[in-house]
Image (cartoon, rainbow, N blue to C red):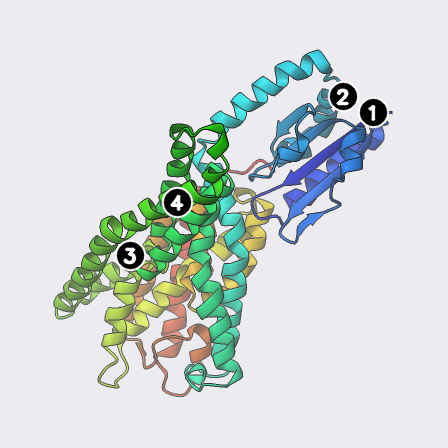
Amino acid sequence: MKKIVAVTSCPTGIAHTYMAAEALQMAAKELGVEIKVETRGSVGAENEITADDLKQAHAVILACDTKIDEDRFQGLPIVRASVKDAIKDPKGLITKAMNMEKKDYVDKVFEAKKEAKERATGVYKHLMTGVSYMIPFVVAGGILIAISFAFGIKAFEQKGTIAAALMDIGGGSAFYLMVPILAGFIAFSIADRPGLVPGMIGGLLANKLGAGFLGGIVAGFAAGYLVAWLKKTIKLPKTMEGLMPVLILPVLSTLIIGLGMIYVVGEPVAALNKAMTEWLKSMSSGSAVLLGIILGLMMAFDMGGPVNKAAYTFAVSTLAAGQPSTIMAAVMAAGMTPPLGLALATLIAKDKFTTEEREAGKAAFFLGISFITEGAIPFAAADPLRVIPSIMIGSAATSVLSILFKCTLAVPHGGIFVLPIPNAVGNLLLYAVAIAIGTVVTALIVSILKPKKVQ
């Protein structure tokens, strides 16, 4: 009996990875074919393919939507597909793998390499590889920050307390690594392991410079394509080729990306941030509705990036006199709306989201009620042209309503956890109404704009 080995891997590693594996196993049983399926999900590799498995294997099926290490499969015929292909037509993939012979295989290797090279330029796949590694950092960090706020909005300021420790773990560590991980694995998807170093360092610099999530994406793609270009361009004698992965590529690419982030991205971002803050201050004496629209749009635009931070910093400055602020209330409400709206959209329009996205929606809800706008990032990264405008409109609606309802906020953070605190929120009921309306607006627009997903 011929034996097939397979690997399944989807972007979030939650559902489709295992659905594809199960479909392949059931189809193989019906066809009378021996198969071993390795799953590479959010918990890591399971049912790993061993060296003995590879010796016995006739062919390999790679049903993967993220980048995996294919070096171990050299010398075997490979059938490449997406996880959805494995779920929809597992018998077809297995039959194709079984029919691949040696003559077939020589042709397929060339075709597979050509296809892999073409797919390596696929922006979506690179982006989703980065997102798949980033999601656990967003969820873990966000939930721990929310638990910290549950002890009190300012409890984390008391050093040595559990609240302070949770804030340090969630905000100071997990959230700080979020953008570098995103950037690093985008670069890894493009250029393999040599892309990790410049990608992650570029992501760290994006954090330090205040460029946030969007700056991290720029750093990741720039690092990946730079390393890929350097690998093709730099030619060394055979005796010195060993220096490429350990010295020349990491040092040269990190230098170029680092200088680019500091001098090309950093200064303009800092100047833009300062200009936006001054602009918002100059507008505070004008139309309240127009200011509300602008603050809402800014809070949702980059979900924790420099534009978001400019609006938030301006709002915090209005608390300096120690009085409750309508601006602070509008900004926090607008920051809660994006993840809440997306969480609701995954419930009312299930056919517009993949199984993994619906699972991510559950985490987005908890992040949203905690005023952690970054909970919307996985959705925005996967479909920016539809998601970002939708959440911007929803946040603008929430912000305007909060100002029109004359809601006030006396603390700079906390989400739902500030609501029970006496005098923390003015016009509490109307404040909740403003957030609810913005959430529904976001969910409806996303649901209308997104196409149906083929599960």
Residue 169 higher or lower than 424, as above or below: above
- Number of other residues with Cα within 10 Å of mark 3, as a class: few under 14, some 14 to 19, many 20 or more: many
Residue at which label 3 appears: 297
Asked if the residue at tag 1 contacts the one at tag 2, i.e. Cβ–Cβ closer than 8 Å, the answer is: yes
Give the residue type at disc 4: Pro
Q: For the residues marked 2 and 1, what is the alpha-carbon distance in whole angstroms?
A: 7 Å
Residue 259 higher or lower than 409, as above or below: above
Q: Nearer the viewer, residue 256 or 65?
A: 256
Q: Nearer the viewer, residue 104 or 156?
A: 104
Q: For the residues marked 4 and 3, what is the alpha-carbon distance in whole angstroms?
A: 15 Å
Q: For the residues marked 4 and 2, what is the alpha-carbon distance in whole angstroms?
A: 40 Å
Q: Is residue 439 visible?
A: no
Numbered disc in front, either 1 or 4: 1
Picture quadrant where residue 212 is located:
bottom left
Give the residue type at disc 3: Leu
Numbered disc in front, either 3 or 2: 2
In this image, 383 relative to 293: left or right?
Answer: right
